[in-house]
C-alpha cells in the first residue's frame, strides 16, 4: 500500500532537489464503500531532511498540502483538511467524497479477488496494526483481506522511521498558526481607505486587485485558514509600498508605511533596514501562503494576463 495517497502526497509535492521529504509515524484510513466517503488520519508528521533550510521547505510544502484550496478531482472531492496537535505531535486529517471508487482502490493498491478486497503490503518497514481486515502472511507476502460483503474498509499502518533522522513539524506549525491568527492593523481596510475604488477585494476567492489606469495587479492565495486573507492583505500593502512605482500610489506612499504590518511578518528575518525588512517579510508571506501575482491589461476586445515571478523579484 502506498504511504502517501489521495491529495496528501507529501513527498510528491516537494521537489526531490530539496533533499528532504515529509514522513509520518502511522496512518489510519477508512473507506466507506456504501456511502462513497473516505477519511485518512496521519499521526506524527515529521521531516527527514538534514538541513534547516530543507526542513523549512518541507514545512512549506506541508502547509500547501494541508491548507490550500483544492478543486474537485477525478477520484475524490476534498471535503475537509486540517492539521492539529495531539499527544505532543502534529497530526493531519482529510475527508473526501469518492467520485471514482475503482480508481481510488487502485490508488490504495487494493484489488478484488474470490476472497473479497485485498491489499498487498510490500514495504518491509510497514506494519498493519489495526482495522477490520485480516492480516495474512504467506509465501505470496503480506496481505490484508476484507470480506467481499464489507461496507467499510479500515486499515491502520505503522511506518518504520527508526533509521532516519527526523524532525517534528509540530513546533514550526505552532509558530505558524499563531502567526496566521495574529491580529493587528487591518491592511485591507488601510488599502481601501487610501486607494478607494482602485482596490477590489474578494474574500471568498482569496483575491485582492489593485487597478489603476486600465491595468490591474491581481494578488491571490488559495489558502483557506482563518488568517489567510489578512496575510494576503499584508502582502499587498507591503508590496505596493515597496515594490511598485506607479503615480496612482503617490498619496498612499506619502502617508507612510505602517511598520507594525512589516514587523509582524518578518518572523526570523534579521534587522537590515526598512526596505530589506519589507522584502524579507514579503518573502515569508509569499512562501507560507503560496501567494501569486498577475498583471492584467484590459483591451477593447480582451484582457491579457501575465504572471509575475515573485520568487525572482523578491530574491528568493
Image (cartoon, helix red, strand yellow):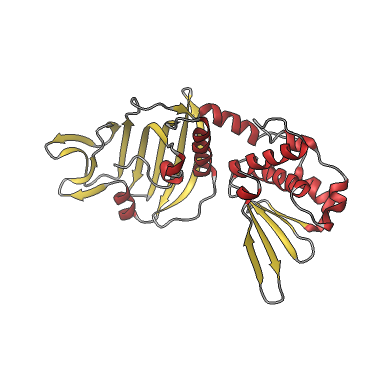
Residue 83 percent across, percent down from the top left: 51, 35
Residue 159 percent across, percent down from the top left: 33, 31
Residue in the picture at 84% in, 48% down: 253
The C terminus sits in image quarter? top right
Which corner quadrant of the image does residue 226 belong to? top right
Count of marks, rendered view: 0
Position above or below: 212 against 280: below
Foreground residue among 249 and 192: 249
Foreground residue among 290 and 67: 290
- Going by the image, does 163 lie left or right of 268? left
Residue in the picture at 37% in, 50% down: 35
Residue 74 percent across, percent down from the top left: 41, 57
The residue at the far bottom in this view is 301
Foreground residue among 102 and 182: 182
The N terminus sits in image quarter? top left
Residue in the picture at 64% in, 36% down: 180
Residue 192 percent across, percent down from the top left: 80, 51
Amino acid at each position: 500500500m502506498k504511504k502517501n495517497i489521495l491529495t496528501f502526497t507529501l513527498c510528491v509535492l516537494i521537489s526531490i532537489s530539496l533533499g528532504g521529504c515529509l514522513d509520518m509515524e502511522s496512518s489510519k484510513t477508512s473507506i466507506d464503500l456504501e456511502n462513497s466517503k473516505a477519511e485518512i488520519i496521519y499521526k506524527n508528521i515529521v521531516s527527514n531532511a538534514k538541513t534547516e533550510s530543507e526542513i523549512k521547505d518541507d514545512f512549506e510544502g506541508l502547509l500547501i498540502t494541508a491548507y490550500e484550496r483544492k478543486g474537485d478531482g477525478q477520484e475524490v472531492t476534498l471535503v475537509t483538511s486540517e492539521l492539529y496537535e495531539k499527544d505532543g505531535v502534529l497530526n493531519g486529517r482529510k475527508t473526501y467524497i469518492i467520485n471514482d471508487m475503482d480508481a481510488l482502490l487502485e490508488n490504495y493498491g487494493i484489488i478484488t479477488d474470490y476472497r473479497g478486497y485485498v491489499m498487498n503490503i510490500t514495504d518491509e518497514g510497514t506494519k498493519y496494526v489495526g482495522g477490520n481486515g485480516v492480516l495474512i502472511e504467506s509465501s505470496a507476502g503480506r496481505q490484508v483481506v476484507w470480506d467481499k460483503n464489507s461496507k467499510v474498509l479500515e486499515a491502520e499502518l505503522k511506518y518504520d522511521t527508526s533509521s532516519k533522522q527526523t524532525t517534528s513539524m509540530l513546533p514550526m506549525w505552532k509558530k505558524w498558526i499563531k502567526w496566521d491568527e495574529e491580529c493587528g492593523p487591518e491592511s485591507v481596510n488601510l488599502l481601501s481607505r487610501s486607494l478607494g475604488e482602485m482596490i477590489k477585494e474578494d474574500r471568498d476567492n482569496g483575491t485582492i486587485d489593485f487597478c489603476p489606469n486600465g491595468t490591474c495587479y491581481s494578488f491571490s492565495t488559495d489558502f483557506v485558514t482563518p488568517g489567510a486573507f489578512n496575510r494576503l492583505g499584508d502582502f499587498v500593502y507591503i508590496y505596493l509600498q515597496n515594490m511598485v512605482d506607479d503615480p496612482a500610489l503617490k498619496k498612499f506612499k506619502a502617508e507612510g508605511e505602517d511598520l507594525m504590518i512589516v514587523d509582524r511578518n518578518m518572523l526570523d528575518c534579521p534587522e537590515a533596514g526598512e526596505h530589506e525588512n519589507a522584502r524579507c517579510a514579503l518573502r515569508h508571506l509569499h512562501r507560507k501562503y503560496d501567494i501569486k501575482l498577475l498583471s492584467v491589461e484590459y483591451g477593447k476586445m480582451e484582457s491579457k494576463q501575465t504572471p509575475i515571478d515573485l520568487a525572482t523579484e523578491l530574491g528568493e
